[in-house]
Image (tube, rainbow, N blue to C red):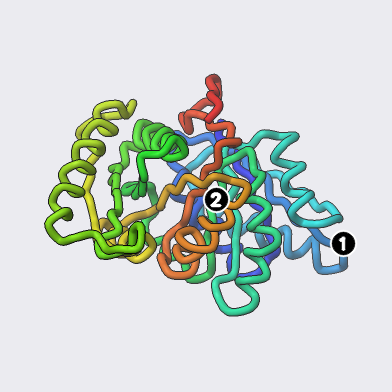
């Protein structure tokens, strides 16, 4: 059984959250879905819940699904994190805005706290996220060869095993960027590419999934722009990104790559931190490993 937690506010982004879930559904899938609304109860709430359940059922027809609803009061981030800690979902599908001051506020509060502290992988979507297919086919995994990249690689391998989807590994070299007060000389570009390609091949050989479903490539440029371009080129369904999760490195990461991708990539962004408890994303949850 795949345990999925979906915090909902009944805004337009809720539909995108359900679209993302649809990519995990199939006639053989068993889904245990919790819709969590954090807010005060009012006369319209029951109707909104019924409408949300109806929308969800329409999107995941054919899958064996149990749907639960919860309405809790309190601070949204704290309530959602407490629910994650207590029930250990396999995945949290969260919605965020992607424009102006509202986006900055949400990223600076609820979504930011979830990305820092969630013990479950966090799939971020917005109203502008592109979700065109009904099943998961292509994953894009940006890696920097650090230990934190292993968490994203592990999840990608498990998703590939379960859904037979293609994994595109990408490493971005900062060509022309300043290092130690200077720029990378053009003659060093080939050496950088070759070194990165060898590392990517080593990653491919060690991934625990069908090797025929894994490809890799090296790109040059600014990371967020290169990842965005690769996502469009490969018709990516999900971008899987490893995050430090806390401290100055997290602040820098969210302030640059993750933040930029949430605003520009128009793809669901699956964020994994070292504190995540990563399941196998298989048809049963009999085995679990700590990422």
Q: In this view, does 217 lie to the left or right of 53?
A: left
- What residue is drawn where x is 36% and y is 49%? 142
Observer-nearest residue: 16 or 122?
Answer: 122
- Residue 6 in view (yes/no): yes
At which x and y percent is residue 232?
29, 63
Task: Read off the residue under disc 1.
Answer: 41
Q: Which mark is residue 249?
A: 2
Outermost top residue: 286
The vertical placement of 281 against 264, above or below, is above
- Residue 65 in view (yes/no): no
Q: Which mark is residue 261?
A: none
The vertical placement of 265 against 204, above or below, is below
At which x and y percent is residue 262?
49, 64
Which SS class for mark 1?
loop
Q: In which quarter of the image is residue 198?
A: top left
Which SS class for mark 2?
helix
At which x and y percent is residue 110?
69, 59
- What residue is drawn where x is 62% and y is 48%? 247
Outermost bottom residue: 100
- What residue is drawn where x is 63% and y is 78%? 101
Instruction: Mark 2 and mark 1 in contact? Answer it, CB < 8 Å.
Output: no
Ranked by sequence position, the earlier of labels 2 and 1 is 1
Comparing marks 2 and 1, which lies closer to the viewer? 2
Q: Quadrant of residue 105?
A: bottom right
The vertical placement of 249 against 110, above or below, is above
Q: Is residue 248 left or right of residue 154?
A: right
Observer-nearest residue: 158 or 58?
Answer: 158
């Amino acid at each position: 059984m795949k345990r999925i937690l979906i915090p909902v506010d009944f805004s337009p982004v809720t539909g995108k959250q359900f679209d993302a879930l649809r990519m995990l559904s199939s006639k053989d899938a068993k889904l245990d879905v919790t819709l969590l609304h954090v807010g005060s109860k009012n006369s319209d709430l029951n109707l909104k819940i019924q409408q949300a359940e109806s929308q969800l059922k329409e999107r995941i027809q054919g899958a064996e699904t149990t749907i639960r609803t919860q309405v809790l009061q309190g601070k949204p981030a704290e309530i959602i994190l407490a629910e994650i800690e207590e029930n250990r979902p396999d995945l949290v599908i969260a919605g965020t805005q992607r424009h102006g001051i509202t986006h900055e506020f949400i990223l600076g509060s609820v979504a930011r706290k979830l990305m820092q502290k969630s013990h479950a992988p966090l799939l971020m979507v917005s109203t502008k996220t592109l979700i065109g297919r009904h099943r998961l086919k292509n994953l894009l995994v940006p890696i920097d060869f650090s230990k934190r990249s292993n968490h994203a690689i592990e999840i990608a391998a498990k998703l590939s095993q379960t859904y037979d989807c293609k994994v595109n590994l990408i490493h971005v070299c900062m060509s022309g960027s300043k290092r130690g007060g200077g720029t990378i000389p053009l003659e060093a570009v080939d050496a950088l590419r070759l070194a990165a390609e060898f590392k990517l091949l080593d990653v491919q050989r060690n991934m625990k999934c069908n090797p025929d479903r894994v490809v890799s490539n090296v790109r040059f440029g600014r990371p967020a722009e290169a990842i965005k371009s690769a996502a469009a080129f490969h018709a990516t369904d999900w971008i899987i990104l490893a995050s430090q999760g806390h401290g100055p490195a997290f602040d820098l990461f969210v302030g640059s790559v993750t933040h930029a991708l949430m605003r520009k990539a128009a793809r669901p962004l699956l964020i994994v931190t070292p504190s995540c408890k990563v399941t196998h994303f298989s048809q049963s949850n009999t085995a679990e490993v700590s990422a």
